[in-house]
Image (cartoon, helix red, strand yellow):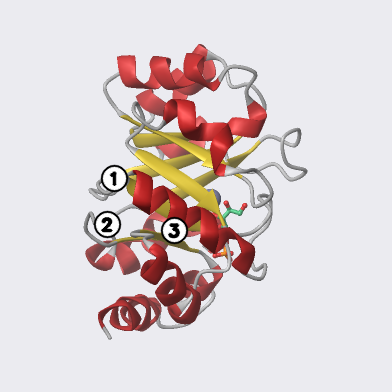
């Protein structure tokens, strides 16, 4: 299994002082998870590529596009803004291969995501070309939701299929749910509320990491 990575989600951070917020966690983070919502694929809207450009950190930016049919130029905006990896949603694209190929052509990491009710079969055609799969463990769109345990069987199945791929989980992740999903094969842990919702973010990250070591 690939190594454990912790990815704080800045959806729950204070955007008006985003670089200070990131500074608090960056020593203990492997990725910074940036949620982009378009008001179409998911109801809310969030920050855009211009905002991503203002982020100053050495930690790789993991951009999660909850966006309907992102165009090449839209995706390029995030690549130019400094994305290390870009995740698209299978349900949001008519032919996800097109977006994945564009991302790979630009020499950054490509990932595909599925919502809790989408089966793993939907993304099997892309498994050989992606660097990471994001298995959503809540319905995308909002922070602070409860982890959906029915997603665990997809994590298990995917880990059996792909021993070396990064399996990211996102939604309702804390020290308890991270451990449960880790036991099924997840290795990249996105957490918003359970990190930025706490006063001591370093302690919050350590709680997650420690739960995985036990
Ligand atoms: C939700 C986003 C998540 C969100 C998770 O659609 O994709 O990244 O920040 O928030 P928590 O960790 O609070 O569930
Ligand atoms: Zn996300």
Q: Is residue 117 above or below residue 91?
A: below
202 or 177, nearer to the observer: 177
User: Does residue 58 lie above or below 90 as drawn?
Assistant: below
* Quadrant of image for the N terminus: bottom left
SS at circle 3: helix
From this view, report whether residue 143 is shown above or below residue 82: below
Residue closer to the observer: 70 or 162: 162
Examine the rendering and report whether any part of residue 88 can be seen: no
The residue that disc 3 covers is 156
Is residue 181 toward the left or the right of residue 43 in the image? left
Residue 27 location, quadrant: bottom left
> Which class describes the residues within 10 Å of circle 1: few (<14), some (14-19), or many (20+)?
some
> How far separated are the C-alphas under marks 1 and 3?
26 Å
Mark 2 and 3 residues: CB-CB less than 8 Å, in contact?
Answer: no
Residue ID for mark 1: 60
**Lower position in the chain sequence, tag 1 or tag 2:** 2
Residue at x 39% of width, y 21% of height: 103
**Which mark identifies residue 30?**
2
Q: Do the residues labelled 1 and 2 touch (CB within 8 Å)?
A: yes
Considering only order in the chain, which callout, 3 or 2, is on the residue closer to the N terminus?
2
């Amino acid at each position: 299994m690939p190594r454990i990575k912790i990815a704080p989600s800045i959806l729950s951070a204070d955007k008006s002082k985003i670089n200070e917020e990131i500074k608090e966690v960056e020593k203990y983070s492997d990725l910074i998870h940036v949620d982009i919502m378009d008001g179409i694929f998911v109801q809310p809207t969030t920050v855009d590529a211009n905002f991503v450009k203002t982020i100053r950190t050495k930690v790789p930016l993991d951009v999660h596009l909850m966006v309907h049919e992102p165009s090449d130029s839209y995706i390029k905006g995030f690549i130019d803004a400094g994305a290390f990896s870009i995740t698209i949603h299978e349900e949001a694209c008519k032919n996800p291969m097109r977006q994945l190929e564009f991302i790979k052509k630009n020499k950054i990491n490509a990932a595909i995501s599925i919502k809790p009710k989408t089966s793993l079969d939907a993304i099997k055609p892309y498994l050989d070309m992606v660097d990471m799969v994001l298995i959503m463990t809540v319905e995308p769109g909002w922070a602070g939701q409860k982890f959906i345990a029915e997603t665990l069987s997809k994590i298990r199945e995917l880990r059996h299929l792909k021993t070396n791929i990064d399996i990211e989980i996102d939604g309702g992740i804390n020290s308890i749910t991270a451990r449960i999903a880790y036991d099924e094969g997840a290795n990249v842990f996105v957490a918003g509320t359970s990190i930025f919702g706490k006063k001591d973010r370093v302690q919050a990250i350590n709680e997650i990491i420690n739960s995985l070591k036990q």
